[in-house]
Image (cartoon, rainbow, N blue to C red):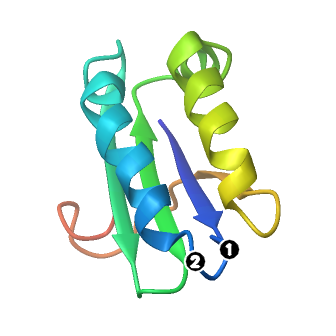
Amino acid sequence: MPTVIARLEPKSDAHDAVLDVLREHVPLVHAEAGCDLYSVHSDGRIIVIVESWETGSALKSHATGPIFTDVNRQLEPLLSAPPRIDILTSVPMGDTQRGTIG
């Protein structure tokens, strides 16, 4: 189960616009096959998306699909830098419910 951490840095005047783009696309991503988690977090300056996918092929389908393409097209002019995307594998520790995502 791959976990993705995506960090977005909106331009100084575009934070709310980035959230609006994400609001439009999140329900579509949630409906994609293999999406276990797609959640958006912000501190008012940066936006972090935490994702969990059933399989690597589900993540690949998302990353090459039309929803991902459209959201990136809309976000590009609103960001001060390219998104930082980290694809990670869980290293479960401690309690099985609290020690892993997915």
Q: Which residue of the protein is positioned furthest toward the right in this rendering?
A: 81
Q: Quadrant of residue 52?
A: top left
Q: Is residue 82 above or below residue 99?
A: above
Q: Is residue 62 above or below residue 86?
A: above
Determine which of the numbered discs, if any, sits on residue 13 in the image. Answer: 2
Give residue 97's position: percent from left, percent from top.
17, 61
Give residue 49's position: percent from left, percent from top.
46, 58
Determine which of the numbered discs, if any, sits on residue 11 in the image. Answer: 1
Q: How many marks?
A: 2
Which amino acid, mark 1?
A: Lys
Q: Quadrant of residue 16?
A: bottom left
Separation of marks 1 and 2 at Cα, in angstroms? 6 Å
Residue ID at (68%, 74%): 11
Q: Is residue 61 left or right of residue 28?
A: right
Mark yes or no: residue 102 visible.
no
Q: Give the camera-side residue of 35 and 25.
A: 25
Residue ID at (30%, 76%): 94
Q: Confirm or deny contact between disc 1 and disc 2 (CB under 8 A).
A: yes
Q: Give the camera-side residue of 42 and 50.
A: 42
Mark 1, other Cα within 10 Å: few <14 / some 14–19 / many ≥20? some
Q: Give the camera-side residue of 59 and 67.
A: 67
Q: Secondary structure at mark 1?
A: loop
Q: Is residue 66 left or right of residue 97?
A: right
Which amino acid, mark 2?
A: Asp
